Amino acid sequence: MKIKFREEAPSNGLHNILAVGTTVRGDIITDGDFRLNGRVEGNINCAAKIVIGPKGHIDGDIISVNAEIQGTVVGSIRTSGALVLKSSSIVTGDIYAQTLEIEPNAKFSGVCNMLSEVKE
């Protein structure tokens, strides 16, 4: 019996997931989508979309194309596209985004800058 393995595309359709109960101390850099359900003590640089799940927690800055926050972020968030703060989100830090959606009951403490181009 022969087993064939498919090669995966470099970043199209690939998703990185950090599970609940997992803590990473250090920076994360990814070219694909990233979902955080655990905890990161460091910065995240995502060249696609990042989703911080309801139990996700980051103590650090986020740079991404798009972001959806359901959990907790203590640090700045910079997106070149859309940022969505879901009703369960708690964000303590500045936001830099092209478009921003904040659901009722979302908690945000910081300064919001909506620019046509995000500058670092």
Image: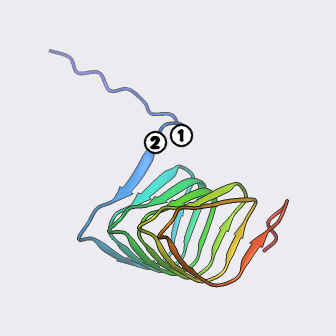
Q: Nearer the viewer, mark 1 or mark 2?
A: 2
Give the alpha-carbon distance from disc 1 to disc 2, as whole Å. 8 Å
In the visual, does 44 lie left or right of 117? left
Q: Residues within 10 Å of mark 1 (few under 14, many from 20)?
A: few
Above or below 31: residue 111: below
Q: Secondary structure at mark 1?
A: loop
Q: Which numbered tag is attached to residue 14? A: 2
Residue on which disc 1 sits: 10
| Figure quadrant of residue 80 | bottom right
Label 2 sits on what residue type? Leu
Task: From the top left corner, tell me how far across and down residue 57 is, in percent.
Answer: 39, 75
Residues at discs 1 and 2 in contact (Cβ within 8 Å) = yes
| Residue closest to the eye, 41 or 54 | 54
**Furthest-front residue in this view:** 104
In the visual, does 4 lie left or right of 63? left
**Furthest-right residue in this view:** 116
Quarter that holds the C terminus? bottom right
Q: Residues within 10 Å of mark 2 (few under 14, many from 20)?
A: few
